[in-house]
Amino acid sequence: MDRFLQSLPNGLVATGAVVIFILLLLQMNPFHTACDSQINLLKEKLNPAFFTKADPKRPDIIPASLYSKYKERCMKGASQGSCLQWFESLKRLDSELLSSPSTCTADILAISEISKILTESLQIMVRLAWGPKAPESAYDKNSWFQNFHLRSFCNLRDWYSSAKGKEAWIDLRESLMDELPGASELSRKEVWSRSILSTSCSSL
C-alpha cells in the first residue's frame, strides 16, 4: 500500500486527502440549509406551547407542553369552553405553518411533534363532534362545533394530506369511521353523513 501511494503523483495524493477530509467534515457536520434555519425559528416561536425541553437539573423529566395540557382538558370536558385553548393553539400552529416558506413545508411537516399533532388532532376532533353515540342525523353532525372549529379541522386535514399524502388521509378517515361509537350499526353512507368528515370545507 505504501509503495502504491509513493507511486502516485504528489498532487493527486494531496487532492485525495483534501476530498476525504471534506467528506468526513460533511458527515460530522452536514450542511445547514435554509429550511434547517426555518425549522429552528419555528420551534423557537412555538416553544413552550408545542416544544419543551428538560430542565438541565432534571434531564430525565420532560415537562408537558401547553398544547398537551390544553388537549387533555379538552378531551376531559368535551365542550366548547373546555376546548377553547386547545383550538386556539391549533389555530396558532396553522398560522405559523402558513407563514413558513412553501419550499420548507415538507421538512416542517416531517417534524415528529408536528406530525403527531396533525394525526391526533384530527382523530380527537372527529370523536368530539360525533360524541358518545351516533348523532341522530346529518343535521346534528357538528354538535357544538362552530365554523371556527370546522375551519381548524379542514386546515389540519389539508396539512395532514400534504405531509403524508392523500392515500394516508383516506386510510385515517376510514379507520376513524369504523371505530366511532355506534358506527357498526349504521351504513358507511350514514356514518359519513353524520360525521364532520363530510364537512364541505370550501363553504367555510
Image (cartoon, helix red, strand yellow):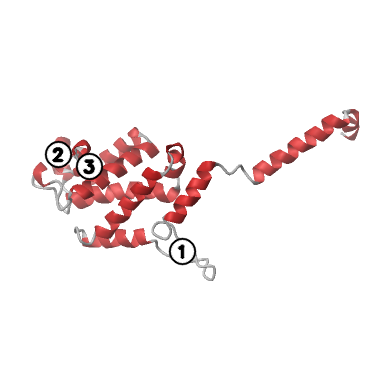
Q: Earlier in the sequence, mark 2 or mark 3?
A: 3
**Which residue is the site of mark 1?**
62
- Of the pair 100 and 113, the residue shown nearer to us: 100
* Residue under the image location 19 percent in, 43 percent down: 196
Q: Which mark is residue 164?
A: none
Foreground label between 1 and 3: 1
Label 3 sits on a secondary structure element that is helix
In the rendered image, which quarter contains the N terminus?
Answer: top right
Foreground label between 2 and 3: 2
Percent x, y for residue 164? Answer: 38, 38
How many numbered badges does the structure rendering display? Answer: 3
**Which residue is the site of mark 2?**
193
Q: Amino acid at mark 2?
A: Ser
Q: Earlier in the sequence, mark 1 or mark 3?
A: 1
- From the viewer's perspective, tell me whether residue 133 is left or right of residue 4: left
Q: Amino acid at mark 1?
A: Ile
Label 1 sits on a secondary structure element that is loop
Q: Amino acid at mark 3?
A: Met
Q: Earlier in the sequence, mark 2 or mark 1?
A: 1
Mark 3 closeness class: few <14, some 14–19, many ≥20 residues within 10 Å:
some
Q: Are marks 2 and 3 in contact (CB under 8 Å)?
A: no
Image quadrant where residue 52 sits: bottom left
**Which residue is the site of mark 3?**
177
Mark 1 closeness class: few <14, some 14–19, many ≥20 residues within 10 Å:
few
Instruction: Tell me if residue 123 comes above or below residue 65 in the rendering.
Output: above
Q: Determine the CA span between mark 2 and mark 3.
A: 11 Å
- From the viewer's perspective, tell me whether residue 32 is left or right of residue 127: right
- Residue 71, visible in the rendered structure: yes
- From the viewer's perspective, tell me whether residue 51 is left or right of residue 36: left
* Residue under the image location 83 percent in, 33 percent down: 13
* Residue under the image location 27 percent in, 63 percent down: 73
In the rendered image, which quarter contains the C terminus?
Answer: top left
